[in-house]
């Protein structure tokens, strides 16, 4: 590769490469087509005579952000409407065209907030493969998406009430078949759901074995114990939510498994429980009080889990767990702020949405800024290591070498 071929150079005040290494002050990224060809300090960098130079003198350059837990095609009522669980009738009436449009809008906004790759951890059958195709073809702007298609749950298990968003399976053969069905439907990876012990260890083991045999990674929703232990024992690639114990964390580290804690989503549930407190039905109020007490205890355990996870070298992945009606502008920035609030250093929070996230899925072409990687790059105004809040000020987004946002030109 000659220096003449470099067509774009982006320079910033600071550069964070996503590996956890010390930031580079006055950093530069050089791009040829879709790929990064050079990363380093401006001082001492080679000349790139034909490059268009974008100077962002106040900005920090980072790898494109990865949202590891999204549901662009889920559509639930707003938590504060009080109808949170009463959705199965709405879902039955879904028009897939509407859902695809909503998903596209969600993904466009995610891209503009710096998310250049998103993992769709469960979506409406038939819709997300089309959305993925539309993005791949450049018909609509969006992050690169990896999709699970429907989530696989045992009969009556987590999210079984979401028709066409979940597939119910039973027994080892049933789980193997469900994995094959979702693969046929276009899944890039498999999403399993287990809350408590809704399914058996043998069922989870069979699903993971089948997915891995077919070359697909496995993501597992976990909730109440022993679902974390079960997922880790089954050898999933990432487990989602929850508050793993020290023993579970130790085992996950040993097995090279990543945890997606999804901190922000707790506040959506809290909002819903608080709404229920206003009910005229004393039983509803009683259950809301119990749920709020459990949520408080869960948050305490989650803080302990995150701090032990970081101490033990368990890698974390950042996931917003947003669906279309809980989508908020800057959802990833909010999750990163919450990860810091729960005990991550700003650098660790950044790794959770860059290097660690990519590593969990073996997405070797993204996640860090290095020669040979895809040119996915964002710039934020300010220094996120001093103040993680500035992650909500993404001023520049480069996706596979194409500038999709550049506020410096305004
Ligand atoms: Zn989810």
Image (tube, rainbow, N blue to C red):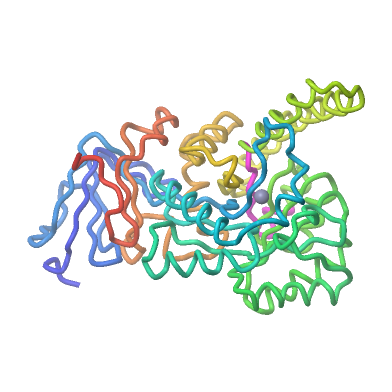
Taking the magenta stretch, the answer to whether it contains residue 258 is: yes
Task: Give the image quarter of residue 409.
Answer: top left
Residue positioned 69% across, 45% down in the render = 241
- Closest to the observer: 134 or 395? 134
Taking the magenta stretch, the answer to whether it contains residue 397 is: no
Residue 116 pos. (x, y %): 42, 54
Q: Is residue 9 left or right of residue 252?
A: left
Q: Which residues are magenta?
A: 251-263
- Pick the quarter of the image with the N terminus: bottom left
Residue positioned 30% across, 65% down in the render = 35
- Closest to the observer: 143 or 211? 143
Residue 90 pos. (x, y %): 71, 50
Extreme residue in the right direction: 283
Residue 80 pos. (x, y %): 67, 30
Q: Is residue 316 left or right of residue 205?
A: left
- Closest to the observer: 16 or 130? 130
């Amino acid at each position: 590769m000659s220096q003449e071929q470099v067509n774009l150079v982006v320079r910033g005040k600071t550069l964070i490469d996503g590996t956890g290494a010390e930031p580079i002050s006055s950093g530069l990224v050089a791009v040829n087509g879709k790929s990064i060809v050079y990363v380093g300090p401006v001082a001492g960098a080679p000349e790139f005579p034909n490059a268009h130079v974008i100077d962002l003198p106040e900005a920090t350059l980072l790898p494109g952000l990865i949202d590891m837990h999204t549901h662009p095609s889920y559509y639930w009522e707003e938590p504060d409407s009080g109808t949170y669980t009463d959705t199965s009738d709405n879902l039955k009436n879904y028009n897939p065209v509407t859902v695809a449009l909503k998903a596209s809008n969600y993904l466009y906004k995610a891209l503009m907030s710096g998310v250049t790759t998103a993992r769709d951890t469960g979506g409406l059958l038939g819709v997300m493969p089309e959305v993925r195709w539309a993005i791949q073809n450049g018909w609509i702007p969006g992050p690169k998406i990896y999709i699970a298609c429907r989530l696989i749950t045992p009969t009556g298990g987590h999210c079984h009430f979401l028709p066409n968003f979940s597939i119910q399976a039973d027994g080892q053969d049933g789980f193997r078949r469900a994995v094959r069905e979702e693969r046929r439907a276009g899944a890039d990876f498999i999403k399993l759901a287990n809350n408590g012990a809704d399914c058996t260890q043998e069922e989870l083991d069979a699903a993971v074995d089948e997915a891995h045999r077919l070359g697909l990674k496995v993501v597992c929703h976990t909730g109440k114990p022993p679902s974390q232990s079960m997922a880790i024992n089954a050898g999933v690639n990432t487990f989602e939510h929850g508050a793993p114990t020290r023993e579970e964390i130790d085992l996950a580290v040993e097995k090279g498994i990543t945890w997606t804690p999804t901190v922000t989503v707790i506040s959506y549930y809290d909002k819903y429980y608080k709404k229920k407190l206003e009910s005229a039905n004393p039983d509803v109020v009683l259950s809301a009080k119990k749920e709020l007490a459990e949520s408080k205890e869960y948050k305490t355990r989650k803080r302990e889990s995150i701090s032990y996870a970081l101490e033990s070298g368990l890698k974390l992945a950042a996931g917003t767990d947003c669906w279309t009606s809980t989508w908020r502008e800057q959802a990833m920035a909010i999750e990163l702020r919450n990860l810091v609030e729960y005990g991550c250093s700003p650098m660790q929070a950044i790794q959770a949405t860059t290097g660690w996230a990519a590593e969990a899925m073996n997405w070797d072409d993204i996640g860090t800024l290095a020669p040979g990687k895809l040119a996915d790059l964002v710039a934020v105004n300010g220094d996120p290591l001093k103040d993680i809040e500035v992650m909500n000020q993404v001023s520049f987004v480069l996706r596979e070498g194409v500038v999709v946002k550049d506020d410096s030109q305004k």
